[in-house]
C-alpha cells in the first residue's frame, strides 16, 4: 500500500504570513491538527495545533480578551512553524511513512511531489490502514490466530487449502512472528478449526465479528 492511497489530497494550507488566530480558526473549523505552510507554491514549513497552543496565552493570564486577540492576530506563523520538515513522496510505501513518523516523533507528514505539496499523511491514516488490513470492521467474519513454525515450508498454502476445502474465503492475512492471523468470511468456524487442528495446527484464538 502506498502513501498516495491513504493520504488526504489537496490539504488545507497556510502561508508564512498567516497569523496564529487565523490558523487556529482554520484547524478548529476543519477539525485538523496540522497544516503545511506554503510560500510561492513550495513547502516552507509545517505547523501543528500543539505549537499554536504553546504560544497562546494560558487561561490564567491577566491579559484581557482584547489583548489576547490582539497578540494572536499579530503573531505570524513564520516565527513558530517547523521549518526543517520531514516529508514523503506519494509513491512511498505506507510503512516508510509510519517509520518516519515514529523515528522523528511527528504525527503527520506533508506529501511532496516535484517540490509541490499534494497531500498530507497522518497517524490517523496509518491507524485506519492497520484496521483495514486486519479486516477488523468486516461484518459476519471471523479472526483465526494460528501458531506456526518459522521454518515450516508451505504453511500458508496448507492453511489456505484447508480453509478453501470448507468453501470459505480468506479475506485478510497477516503473519506476526510465530502467529498467522487469517480473517475468513464466515462466523461458522467450528469445522474449520477441527480441520486445522486435525492437520497439526494449534489454534491460539478465534474471534467473531457481529457488527
Image (cartoon, helix red, strand yellow):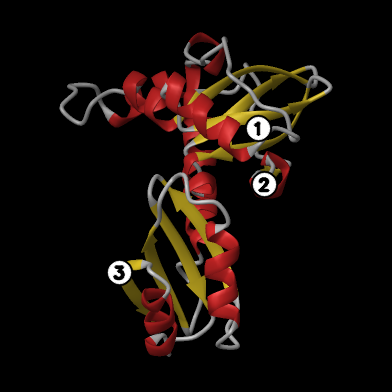
Percent position of residue 24, x then y? 47, 34
Mark 2 Cα within 10 Å, few/some/many (few <14, many 20+)?
few
Q: Is residue 11 above or below residue 132?
A: above
Q: Secondary structure at mark 3?
A: strand
Seen at 49% across and 28% down, the residue is 101
- Nearest to the eye among marks 2 and 1: give it: 2
Percent position of residue 148, x then y? 40, 55
Q: CA distance from mark 3 to mark 2?
A: 27 Å
The count of marks equals 3
Which mark, by number, is residue 205?
3
- Can residue 211 be seen here? The reply is no
Mark 1 Cα within 10 Å, few/some/many (few <14, many 20+)?
many
Q: Secondary structure at mark 2?
A: loop
Q: Earlier in the sequence, mark 2 or mark 1?
A: 2
Q: Image check: 8 left or right of 63? A: right
Seen at 73% across and 41% down, the residue is 10
Percent position of residue 174, x then y? 50, 55
Q: Secondary structure at mark 1?
A: loop
Seen at 52% across and 25% down, the residue is 100
- Can residue 198 be seen here? The reply is yes
Q: 69 and 37: which one is in front?
A: 37
Q: Earlier in the sequence, mark 1 or mark 3?
A: 1
Percent position of residue 39, x then y? 73, 17
Give the labeled residue for mark 1. 13
Give the labeled residue for mark 2. 1
User: Do labels 3 and 2 touch, CB within 8 Å?
Assistant: no
Amino acid at each position: 500500500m502506498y502513501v498516495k492511497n491513504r493520504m488526504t489530497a489537496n490539504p488545507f494550507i497556510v502561508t508564512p504570513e498567516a497569523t496564529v488566530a487565523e490558523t487556529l480558526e482554520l484547524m478548529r473549523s476543519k477539525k485538523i491538527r496540522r497544516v503545511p505552510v506554503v510560500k510561492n507554491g513550495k513547502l516552507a514549513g509545517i505547523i501543528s495545533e500543539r505549537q499554536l497552543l504553546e504560544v497562546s496565552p494560558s487561561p490564567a493570564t491577566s491579559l484581557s480578551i482584547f489583548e489576547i486577540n490582539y497578540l494572536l492576530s499579530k503573531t505570524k506563523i513564520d516565527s513558530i512553524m517547523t521549518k526543517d520538515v520531514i516529508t514523503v513522496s506519494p509513491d512511498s510505501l505506507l510503512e516508510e511513512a509510519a517509520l518516519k513518523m515514529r523515528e522523528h516523533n511527528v504525527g503527520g507528514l506533508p506529501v511532496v511531489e516535484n517540490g509541490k505539496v499534494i497531500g498530507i499523511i497522518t497517524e490517523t491514516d496509518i491507524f485506519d490502514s492497520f484496521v483495514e488490513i486486519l479486516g477488523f470492521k468486516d461484518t459476519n467474519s471471523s479472526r483465526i490466530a494460528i501458531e506456526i513454525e518459522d521454518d515450516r515450508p508451505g504453511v500458508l498454502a496448507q492453511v489456505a487449502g484447508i480453509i478453501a476445502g470448507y468453501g470459505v474465503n480468506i479475506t485478510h492475512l497477516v503473519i506476526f512472528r510465530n502467529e498467522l492471523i487469517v480473517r475468513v468470511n464466515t462466523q461458522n468456524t467450528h469445522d474449520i478449526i477441527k480441520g486445522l487442528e486435525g492437520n497439526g495446527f494449534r489454534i491460539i484464538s478465534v474471534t467473531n465479528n457481529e457488527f
